């Protein structure tokens, strides 16, 4: 009898929670809406920028892609643009967590090595020749892994040092230390979701090791909220010297003929 009562209470709590969540979502959606004619006009034109970036394509396909349907990393758009301008064909990349970023990097660098903990996810991708993905057992949580976790230690098995390391998977705070041991002195560490307070201890460690940090905040493919992707390097000046002119994403209103 007590179990039935407790089960009924849990069901009621779940119903109340779902109803409350929907109300909050509606309140947020109402808060997002433009309130004046000027705001409506500007909002529509701003959506044009998102159309040009391919954000609508990524939403409709529920995939991290650009306007032409080509794979993109699930990072903020400003960080994608910056990485596009600094990566070189000879770079060696390692990823904690594979996905659209794997295909995107593969088109721009010499080789991509990735580790993931989900076999079914990896099987969804047709990988080019310059990509090697390992499925490794993971024990831990989003911040820390158990000692000697195969997932975290996979980065050291190749015996190579990397130019770029992306941390966008599990056990992110544990992965920072492994990345520090295998990054070239002039290398770049990319850390996604750097705006989350739970990740901040990793940034203090990197600061202690004399890494310079740059934040790229904004929206991301398929995303509806603001976020941040950060890059770290002990020789950031070298990466800044690599920067090429930014790609032009806009579209002139003069291309349209008003009648």
Image (cartoon, rainbow, N blue to C red):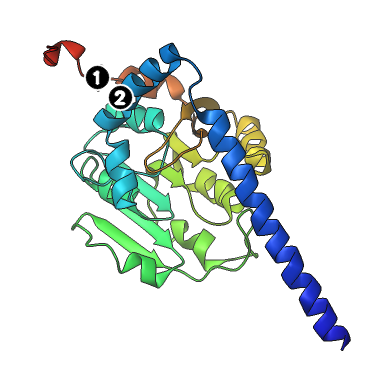
Q: Can residue 195 be seen in this view?
A: no
Q: Circles 1 and 2: CB distance less than 8 Å? A: yes
In screen coordinates, is 149 left or right of 251? Answer: right
Q: Where in the figure is residue 143, as x and y percent of width and height?
A: 63, 53
Secondary structure, mark 2, is helix
Asked which quadrant contains residue 12, the reply is bottom right
| Disc 1 from disc 2: Cα separation | 6 Å
Residue situated in front as seen by the camera: 70 or 172: 70
Q: Is residue 40 above or below residue 1?
A: above
Asked which quadrant contains residue 26, the reply is top right
In screen coordinates, is 255 left or right of 9? Answer: left
Q: Where in the figure is residue 249, as x and y percent of width and height?
A: 25, 23
Residue situated in front as seen by the camera: 79 or 88: 79
Residue under circle 2? 49
Residue situated in front as seen by the camera: 169 or 212: 169
Residue at image location 29% in from the left, 60% down from the top: 132
Secondary structure, mark 1, is loop
Reading the chain from its start, which is encountered first: label 1 or label 2?
Answer: 2
Q: Is residue 238 visible?
A: yes
Residue at image location 20% in from the left, 19% down from the top: 251
Q: Where in the figure is residue 58, as x and y percent of width and height?
A: 31, 44
Quadrant containing the N terminus is bottom right
Residue under circle 1? 250
Q: Where in the figure is residue 161, as x and y percent of width and height?
A: 40, 46
In screen coordinates, is 188 left or right of 124? Answer: right
């Amino acid at each position: 009898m007590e179990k039935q009562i407790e089960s009924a209470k849990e069901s009621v709590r779940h119903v109340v929670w779902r109803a409350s969540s929907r109300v909050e979502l509606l309140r947020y959606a109402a808060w997002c809406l433009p309130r004046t004619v000027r705001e409506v006009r500007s909002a529509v034109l701003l959506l044009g920028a998102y159309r040009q970036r391919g954000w609508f394509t990524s939403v409709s396909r529920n995939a991290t892609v650009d306007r032409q349907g080509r794979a993109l990393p699930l990072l903020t758009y400003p960080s994608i643009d910056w990485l596009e301008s600094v990566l070189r064909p000879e770079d060696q990349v390692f990823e904690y967590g594979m996905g659209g970023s794997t295909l995107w990097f593969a088109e721009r660098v010499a080789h991509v090595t990735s580790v993931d903990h989900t076999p079914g996810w990896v099987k969804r991708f047709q990988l080019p020749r310059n990509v090697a993905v390992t499925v490794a057992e993971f024990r831990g949580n989003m911040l820390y892994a158990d000692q000697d976790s195969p997932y975290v230690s996979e980065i050291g098995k190749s015996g190579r040092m990397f130019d770029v390391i992306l941390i966008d998977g599990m056990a992110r705070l544990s992965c920072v230390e492994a990345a520090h041991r295998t990054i070239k002195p002039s290398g770049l560490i990319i850390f996604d979701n750097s705006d989350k307070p739970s990740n901040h201890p990793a940034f203090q460690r990197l600061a202690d090791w004399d890494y310079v940090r740059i934040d790229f905040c904004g929206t991301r493919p398929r995303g509806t909220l603001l976020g941040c992707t950060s890059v770290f390097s002990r020789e950031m000046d070298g990466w800044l010297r690599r920067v090429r002119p930014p790609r032009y994403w806009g579209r002139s209103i003069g291309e349209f003929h008003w009648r």
